Image (tube, grey):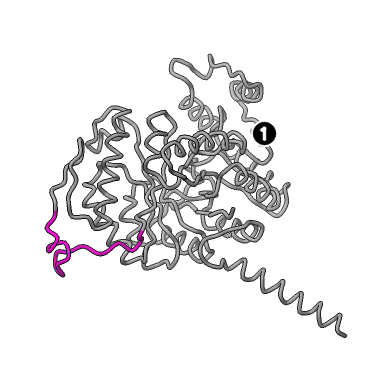
Amino acid sequence: MAVKILWYLTTPDGPYPWEAEGRWNTDFDHLKQIAVTADRLGYYGSLLGSSPNESLAVSAALIDATKRLRFLVAQHPGEVSPAILAKWALTFDKFSDGRLLFNVVNGNDAGLATVGVHYPHDERYDFSLEYWRAFKGYYAGETEGYDGRYVKLTPRHAAAANHPLGGWHQPVQPAGIPLWGAGTSGPGVAHSVQLLDVYLSFANTPPKLGEKFAKVAAEAAKIGRTLTYGTRLQIIVRETEEEAWEHAERLLQRTSLQTARQSIERQLPPGETLETYVSADPQIQRNLDTIRAGRLPKARDLEIYPNVWLGPSLFGFNILGPAAGTYLVGSAAQVAERIREYEAHGTSAFILSGFPLIEEAHRVADLLFPLLDIDHGYELPQLAVKAKTLADDQSRDSKSLAA
């Protein structure tokens, strides 16, 4: 089973952007450089991460700068009408030759309320199903409208739908826009297996992530659906294991104790504090005791599985357990081995990031791509070079034997 490798595209960047002194003041030109780099290196796509910028606008602005890169755009149901989003998607796909993916995000009660969506937790998933079904119908060219409990769209006149002035484009992706997303609660999983094409989860160890994906796959099978599965990881890959862990230690040393404490406090159960919380995991408890004593643990103290690291990142310092900030750390051979282990447990899409984003995108492509079975729908530059080198070596060997 071949894998797909995506990169991260966001405004915060720098050598260690979770600290103010390690964060650059970036602009649109910098975003464009990241996208162009990922495109030319052969990444399957880019996840447009959280930032002050609207992801729909950013992705549209980058169509002309890229050729093959797909844009995985986070979208909350209800931010805009599903009909308007469908017309936007049809336009984007027309201009980009079908390079749009949507990351279905159902958010939380407080966050969605700020954009006008006020359904309680479980009901949000019912609303989301209707929203995305209406969207998919409109993207496919349906004109009958939609009459649901939450979403009501008046039918369009078929003649107007095809008028040269007011009509809509035909879909470029015949199967529709691929929908990626997550959902861990019971209603979240039920929603995912009915709607998504790619089920996403924050990383864990390969076996534990595989267990989660197997449970989701079993639920999908009950309704006759098959999904593919992806995860989100930070990455530090170097030519040697020593170089990788030296860099991890440098990132840790540049992280303030205050950042670590604040991150832990955000992860604690309600009513707990850093001083009162006790973990049943001895490794986590040792690291908590070190932080309570006013020091940060050593980098290897935060390794929870071979090459799986809970170090500091822009997405959190997840000392209490794997989450958005989980890393892969090691030599190219080690990281490739770990990715193959994740693959064996069901993961086929990897959304990676390392900072600075351009510099690390080059490292990952140069060191890691040649060691993996990758299917992005086209030949990757690194693999073309590898194939040519192999062919040249074989040709020289043949000539040598003939002589």
Residue 353 visible (yes or no): no
**Magenta-colored stretch includes residue 312:** no
Which residue occupies the foreground of this view, 182 or 223? 223
Which residue occupies the foreground of this view, 357 or 217? 217
Q: Amino acid at mark 1?
A: Lys
Q: Taking 258 as reference, is 60 left or right?
A: left
In the rendered image, residue 214, in percent from the top left (x then y), is placed at 54, 36
Which residue occupies the foreground of this view, 214 or 389? 214
Residue 224 visible (yes or no): yes
Where 261 sits versus 4, above or below?
A: above
Q: Taking 63 as reference, is 290 left or right?
A: right
The quarter holding residue 2 reads: bottom right
Q: Residue at x 51, y 30 (%)?
A: 258
Where 23 sits versus 302, above or below?
A: below
Q: Residue at x 48, y 28 (%)?
A: 262
In the rendered image, residue 107, in percent from the top left (x then y), is placed at 35, 36
In the rendered image, residue 197, in percent from the top left (x then y), is placed at 42, 47
Q: Residue at x 47, y 42 (%)?
A: 200
Secondary structure beneath dot 1 equals: loop
Give the residues drawn in magenta, as a range.
156-174
Q: Taking 396 as reference, is 171 left or right?
A: left
Residue that badge 1 annotates: 298
